Image (cartoon, rainbow, N blue to C red):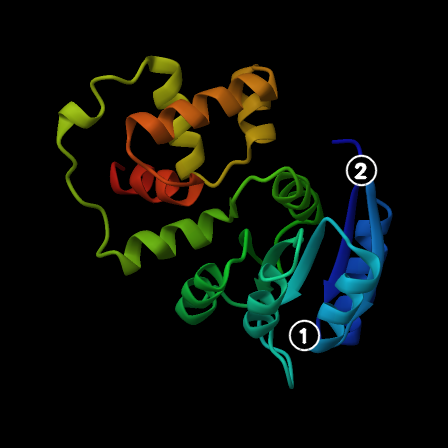
């Protein structure tokens, strides 16, 4: 994927302006519009058909979670990445249940947000390391996992699983392990099969539980 179009939805005009300017300067990212609430975001999506919506969780009127539910019901819906100033249980669980592709905090570096946009647009679940750790905590913290579960994993698969648990995207894993991104995608797919996980989020939680 060479380019990603994004809509930014946030009720804070300072945040909208900052993200619009910062993301608009990033290579391969086009800001298709900005919205001050969830209803405006849905309208913009219908009119502009972006790849990704960067959606604030808490907004007046239609909030980010309600807007996400509406967006995922559209034909060819965009990926939604929810963002908030604080990593909260309500935002994390509610957003994922609503169908968000990912979750990040507003204080994340712009480069990390850009990478998340690209990953979400390509169909990859995106969770910040903070969000992954919160999921583990909500699940009751690290749990001992029977060693036979890992016996079928090769050394490279274990490395990929560890990095997924750290919240790394496929692109970041590829850079860290000096692999092609397509090779990383293959590892992730095989890990989901071997570990009986339905998505990347489940893989990340399992990796955190394994320590």
Q: Residue at x 42, y 71 (%)?
A: 90
Q: Residue at x 60, y 16 (%)?
A: 180
Q: Quadrant of the rendered structure where residue 140 is?
A: bottom left
Is residue 37 at all visible to an observer of this figure?
Answer: no
Looking at the picture, tell me which residue is in the foreground, 192 or 141. Answer: 192
State the SS at label 2: loop
Where residue 46 appears, as percent x and y from the top left, is: 77, 63
How would you rate the neighbour count of disc 2 (Cα within 10 Å): few for under 14, some for 14-19, many for 20 or more?
few
Is residue 207 at all visible to an observer of this figure?
Answer: yes
Q: Residue at x 14, y 26 (%)?
A: 147
Where residue 203 appears, as percent x and y from the top left, is: 36, 38
Where residue 53 appears, as percent x and y from the top left, is: 69, 58
Which residue corresponds to mark 2? Answer: 3
Quarter that holds the N terminus: top right
Find residue 12 and name its label: none
Looking at the picture, tell me which residue is in the foreground, 115 or 63. Answer: 63
State the SS at label 1: helix
Relative to 116, say whether 190 is above or below. above
How far apart are the two marked residues, 2 and 1, measured between alpha carbons? 24 Å
Where residue 56 appears, as percent x and y from the top left, is: 63, 68
Which residue corresponds to mark 1? Answer: 38
């Amino acid at each position: 994927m060479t380019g990603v179009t994004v809509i930014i939805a946030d009720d804070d005009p300072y945040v909208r302006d900052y993200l619009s300017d910062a993301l608009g300067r990033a290579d391969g990212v086009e800001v298709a519009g900005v919205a001050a609430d969830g209803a405006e975001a849905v309208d913009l999506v219908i009119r502009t058909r972006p790849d990704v919506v960067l959606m604030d969780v808490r907004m007046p009127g239609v909030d980010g979670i309600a807007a996400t539910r509406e967006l995922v019901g559209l034909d060819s819906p965009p990926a939604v990445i929810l963002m908030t100033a604080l990593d909260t249980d309500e935002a994390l669980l509610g957003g994922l249940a609503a169908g968000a592709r990912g979750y990040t905090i507003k204080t994340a570096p712009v480069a990390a947000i850009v990478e998340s946009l690209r990953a979400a647009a390509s169909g990859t679940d995106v969770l910040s390391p903070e969000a992954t750790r919160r999921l583990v905590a909500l699940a009751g913290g690290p749990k001992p996992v029977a060693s036979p579960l890992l016996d079928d994993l090769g050394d490279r698969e274990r490395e990929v699983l560890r990095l997924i648990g750290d919240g790394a995207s496929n692109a970041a894993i590829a850079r860290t392990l000096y692999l092609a991104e397509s090779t990383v995608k293959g590892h992730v797919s095989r890990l989901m099969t071997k570990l009986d996980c339905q998505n990347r989020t489940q893989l990340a939680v399992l990796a955190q539980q394994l320590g």
